[in-house]
Amino acid sequence: MPYIDQSGYEPPFIFRNAHLNTLYAALGRKVKGVAFRRERLTTPDGDFIDLDWSEVGSSRLLILLHGLEGNSGRPYILGMTRVFNAQGWDVAALNFRGCSGQPNLLPRSYHIGDTGDLRQVVHHVLNRGAHRQVALSGFSLGGNVILKFLGEDPDAVPGEICAAAVFSVPCDIATASVEIDKWENRLYRWRFMRSLNAKMSRKAELWPDLVKMPTAKPRHFRDFDNYFTAPLHGFADAHDYWTRCGSISFISRIRVPALMVNAQDDTFLSPACYPVEIAEKHPLFYLETPAYGGHVGFVTSSRDGVYWSERRAWKFISAQARDIGIEHRQ
């Protein structure tokens, strides 16, 4: 039922080019007016994660998750933070392990299906007692983590979670990995591999018995995940990792209103990343597929600098929050 085939996103003409939309949003956009307060959490396995807070004194909280090799300083995180702060919501941006500017302490890192750190953050913020409603929003890898978190054990999702809005999600990882390997995505893949390989080189120096760099550094995700991600995180190989971690297998079990926006021109996504049939049958999973937007793009020409994706997330999440009816805490 909630498949939204008529999206409201209409980009400026030049940004109908998917690559321009993707690159400008990532490299050309500047977002001002957001100041974070950092909190470091110790994880049960002896590592740490950094949580960046932007608070306005609200009983409502948005938790944000960035994409692969991103962090809380990415424009899409700052833009979403600014919008929700302006609407009276606190925001907490989770930096995945090793993404906050300091290497994490263990050989393992983060990955596209690791929901443990998000689960710890959710329980941490609820235990503080300041927030009676919590929403989730994530981008690309972070969006997959959110959907998997909501669907892998729906009985364990706290009742305070009122909604989720995710963007540019490679929910079928195995087929999306074929798309990222295509020629048109070579620049993006090169940037990802350069950053990921640099991190693994540092880990190989610290834990030579556990992490070994191959003679030729991985140039593709399949190689990287076979060499590093799978063995360090308990998977048999890259295919096992992709199959077990794709949120496509968990969406049908979600019991929280969730919006996924995947642009039709996103060059990172495969046809399987547009689960229309699931959305048509699921009363709480909303799929929106605008014709344009690129990957985590959705560039918008507006005087206030707000992007369409941020207005869309606010419209969806605020509607769910109003239905529950908890008032803003002054």
Image (cartoon, rainbow, N blue to C red):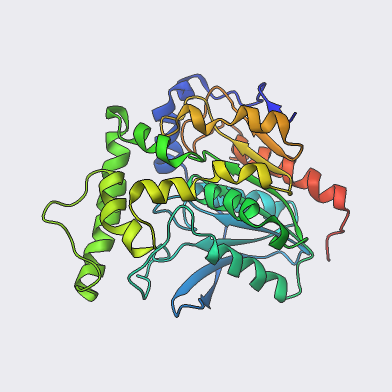
Name the side, left or right, on which 105 lies relative to 305: left
Identified at 60% across, 33% down, the residue is 302
Q: Is residue 260 above or below residue 125?
A: above
Q: Is residue 213 above or below residue 178?
A: below
Q: Position of residue 91 (x, y in %)?
A: 64, 60
Farthest residue toward the left? 215
Q: Which is nearer the eye, 177 or 237?
A: 237
State the count of labels.
0
Q: Position of residue 235 (x, y in %)?
A: 38, 57
Identified at 71% across, 70% down, the residue is 126
Residue 122 in view (yes/no): yes
Q: Position of residue 185 (x, y in %)?
A: 32, 33
Farthest residue toward the front? 236
Q: Which is nearer the eye, 109 or 130?
A: 109
Q: Which is nearer the eye, 40 or 47?
A: 47
Q: Quadrant of residue 128?
A: bottom right
Name the side, left or right, on which 17 lies relative to 301: left
Q: Is residue 245 above or below residue 40?
A: above
Q: Which is nearer the eye, 250 or 51?
A: 250
Q: Quadrant of residue 39?
A: bottom right
Farthest residue toward the top? 13
In the picture, which quadrant includes the C terminus?
Answer: bottom right
Identified at 45% across, 45% down, the residue is 243
In the picture, which quadrant includes the N terminus?
Answer: top right
Identified at 44% across, 41% down, the residue is 173
Residue 303 in view (yes/no): no
Q: Position of residue 106 (x, y in %)?
A: 36, 74
Q: Is residue 233 above or below residue 189?
A: below
